[in-house]
Amino acid sequence: TTGLLNLYDDGTMSGKWLQQMRADSSTGNGLFVRAGVTSSYYTAYLTGYDENNVHLVVRGDGNVGIGTDSPNTPLHTKFTFNTTYPTALNAWNGAVIENASTTTDTVANLHLRANGADAHIVGIYKGANTADLAFVLDNAGTKQTNMYIKANGLVGIGTTSPAYLLDVTGSFDGNYTSVISNTHATAGYGLLIKAGDDNNVRTLTCRDKDDGALFSVNGGGNVGIGDESPSYKLEVAGN
């Protein structure tokens, strides 16, 4: 490419820098580039020696491309990696945000901001090769963890200490914690629970907020109202 300043390697610079800039001061600045105004021009363009592989570009409109010279957004990353899931997870590809600390509960954080309102996707270090994941949102200026996924697969909504595969906790005055709705006009089904094989285990249990027994269906088909260990097909306890 022809320019005002062109530096060429004639083959004698193998393993060496073609150009080095250094500021011998803790307050010294590096390289300042002023160029480009619109998406038709580039402020910076980095490519391989054969110019076939684009590494990094900064366009005049401020968009940055990694692996592409036509970034459509402020940050646009493009690559081709043909290994499929889940094998691909064992390879370095895509984007990585790494915190090298070995202190338990330190984080690597993807911080999203929309006009001062923040959202965070947070990886939490829990030990060697073990990580939890949290989704944290601004709620009237307070950071609130809305979903928490533990390394062992337990998922908490409204709790950061889930004890079950899905643990939903909340306090709602005059409303339901969870609703399952099927809006199909003619053949909508509700909730299917598959669990239990005899009356020693429970397929469905309903309790009040203080853990008082309300309703129970056991794996063998016995149903209890006010009793979680019914001995009959229908057993009612209480006054």
Image (spheres, helix red, strand yellow):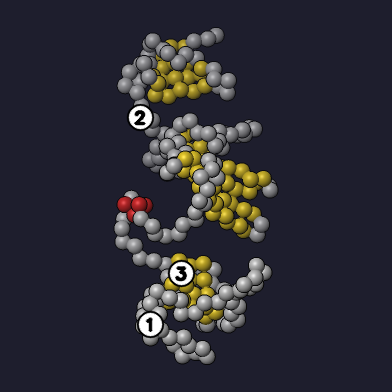
How far separated are the C-alphas under marks 3 and 2? 48 Å
Query: Quarter of the image holding residue 221?
Result: top left
Q: Please, what is the three-letter code of the amino acid marked with disc 3?
A: Ile
Q: Earlier in the sequence, mark 2 or mark 1?
A: 1
Viewer-proximal residue, 54 or 236? 54
Where is residue 150 shown, x and y percent of the image? 47, 39
Q: Nearer the viewer, mark 3 or mark 2?
A: 3
Viewer-proximal residue, 26 or 158? 26
Q: Look at the numbered disc 1 and give the secondary structure of its residue.
A: loop
Up-down relation of residue 226 to residue 118 (above or below):
above
Which quadrant, please, contains the C terminus? top right
Q: Nearer the viewer, mark 1 or mark 3?
A: 1
Residue at 31 percent of width and 58 percent of height? 83
Which quadrant, please, contains the N terminus? bottom left
User: Which residue was labeled with disc 1?
Assistant: 12
Q: Please, what is the three-letter code of the amino acid marked with disc 2?
A: Lys
Q: Please, what is the three-letter code of the amino acid marked with disc 1?
A: Thr
Query: Quarter of the image holding residue 43?
Result: bottom right
Q: Earlier in the sequence, mark 1 or mark 3?
A: 1
Residue at 61 percent of width and 33 percent of height? 171
Q: Which mark is on residue 194?
A: 2
Where is residue 199 shown, x and y percent of the image? 35, 16
Q: Is 145 left, or right, of 116 in this rendering?
A: left
Q: Look at the numbered disc 2 and give the secondary structure of its residue.
A: loop
Residue at 42 percent of width and 67 percent of height? 78
Residue at 55 percent of width and 77 percent of height? 21
